[in-house]
Image (tube, rainbow, N blue to C red):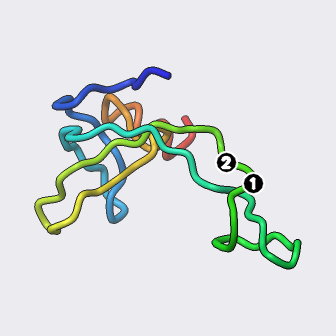
Amino acid sequence: MTAKFSIGQEVWFMSNNRPTCMQVCKIDIKSVPTKYNTNDGENYENYGDVLEWAKPTIHYDFWDCDSPYLKELCESEVFATKEELRKAVFGE
């Protein structure tokens, strides 16, 4: 699995319904549970042992100057240029 962007690279994404450009500060590969086993045999999210995991995806983190927290986005939400972002948002 290879990330499209590098740490320190400026990328574009939507934030608060506005195009935003920030530098990538961290890259993670994550997989989230999609199916759990409960003691009674039924499957409920967030209970018991994990039975299935989603396909791993690349996530990028950004420091948001307006917040003390990192902003985290999936690779599919991040674009190299403002024009690529515009095309993705408006379907052109």
Q: Residue furthest right?
A: 41
Identify the residue under disc 1: 51
Contact flag, marks 1 and 2 (Cβ < 8 Å) = no
Give me the residue at 69% from left, 70% from top. Answer: 48
Give me the residue at 39% from left, 24% from top. Answer: 4
Residue 26 position by quadrant:
top left
Q: Residue furthest front?
A: 39
Identify the residue under disc 2: 53
Give the distance between the C-alpha atoms of the residues marked 1 and 2, in whole angstroms. Answer: 7 Å
| Residue type for callout 2 | Trp
Give me the residue at 69% from left, 58% from top. Answer: 50
Q: Nearer the viewer, residue 81 or 49?
A: 49
Indicate the position of residue 24 as horizontal and vertical percent values: 23, 38
- Left or right: 25 in relation to 58: left
Give me the residue at 11% from left, 60% from top. Answer: 65
Q: Nearer the viewer, residue 42 or 13?
A: 42
Looking at the image, how many numbered discs can be counted on the residues?
2
The label shown at residue 10 is none
User: Relative to residue 37, is residue 61 depicted above or below?
Assistant: above
User: Relative to residue 45, is residue 55 depicted above or below?
Assistant: above
For the C terminus, which image quadrant?
Answer: top right
Element marked by disc 2? strand
Indicate the position of residue 64 as horizontal and vertical percent values: 18, 58
- Left or right: 76 in relation to 27: right
